[in-house]
Image (cartoon, rainbow, N blue to C red):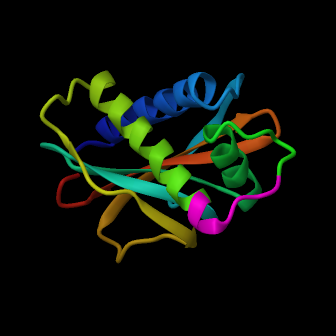
């Protein structure tokens, strides 16, 4: 997979997350602040595999405060309501990343692709060195997310 192809996937993931944030989470005004090579910053988030000819992992990461805001929004809670237990936040983030991955399947015309099970991560994420990773930083008002795409270098 070429670097341009990975960038195409990241663009689709970023567009899909912005759409989910607007339509499902009620968070308008997404701004992409830039992209970079490397893993998401420390924090929390969820990732899911998209299994296709070129298999990838897509993930949504952020600070605990941003992840709580995304989870509360998905559950129809107000921004000032009490934080969710971590297990509920993890479930909500897994659902959000599943929705993003499903939207990507449509955007990239991956009709036969399968989605894996979402994985919640808290802390630093990295692989054993055999992966290409691109990250896009997206802002929604006071909240920020890092959308990432990862593929094995053998597929890259």
Relative vertical location of residue 50 with respect to residue 129 in this rendering, above or below: above
Q: Residue at x 79, y 39 (%)?
A: 78
Q: Position of residue 149 (x, y in %)?
A: 40, 49
The residue most toward the right is: 80
18 sits left or right of 109 in the view = right
Instruction: From the viewer's perspective, tell me whether residue 48 is left or right of residue 52.
Output: right
Residue plotted at (63% across, 32% down): 25
Tell whether position 83 is magenta. Answer: yes
Dividing the picture into quarters, in which one does residue 74 lie? top right
In terms of depth relative to the viewer, which is nearer, 135 or 36? 135
Residue at 32% over, 63% down: 131
Question: Is residue 147 something one can see in this rendering?
Answer: yes
Name which quarter of the figure residue 85 lies in: bottom right
**Magenta includes 1?**
no
Question: Which residue is pictured at 68% across the width and 26% down the height?
Answer: 26
Quarter occupied by the N terminus: top left
Residue 42 seen from this side: no
84 to the left or right of 106 = right
Q: What number of labels is visible?
A: 0
Percent coordinates x, y for residue 114 in the rendering: 19, 44
**Residue that sits furthest to the bottom in the current view:** 128
Which sits in the foreground, 105 or 1? 105
Q: Nearer the viewer, residue 112 or 86?
A: 86
The percent coordinates of residue 153 (x first, y second) are 25, 60
Point out the stretch of residues depicted in magenta.
82-88
Relative placement, left or right, of 148 versus 83 is left
């Amino acid at each position: 997979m070429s670097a341009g192809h990975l960038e195409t996937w990241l663009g689709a993931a970023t567009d899909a997350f912005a759409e989910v944030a607007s339509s499902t989470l009620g968070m308008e005004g997404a701004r992409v602040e830039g992209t970079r090579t490397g893993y998401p910053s420390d924090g929390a988030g969820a990732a899911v595999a998209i299994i296709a000819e070129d298999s990838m992992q897509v993930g949504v990461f952020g600070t605990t405060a941003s992840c709580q805001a995304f989870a509360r929004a998905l559950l129809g809670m107000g921004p000032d309501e009490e934080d969710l237990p971590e297990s509920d936040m993890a479930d909500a983030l897994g659902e959000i990343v599943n929705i993003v991955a499903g939207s990507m399947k449509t955007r990239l015309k991956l009709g036969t692709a399968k989605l894996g099970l979402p994985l919640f991560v808290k802390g630093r994420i990295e692989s054993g060195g055999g992966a290409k990773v691109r990250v896009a930083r997206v802002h929604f008002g006071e909240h920020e997310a890092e959308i990432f795409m990862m593929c094995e270098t053998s597929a890259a």
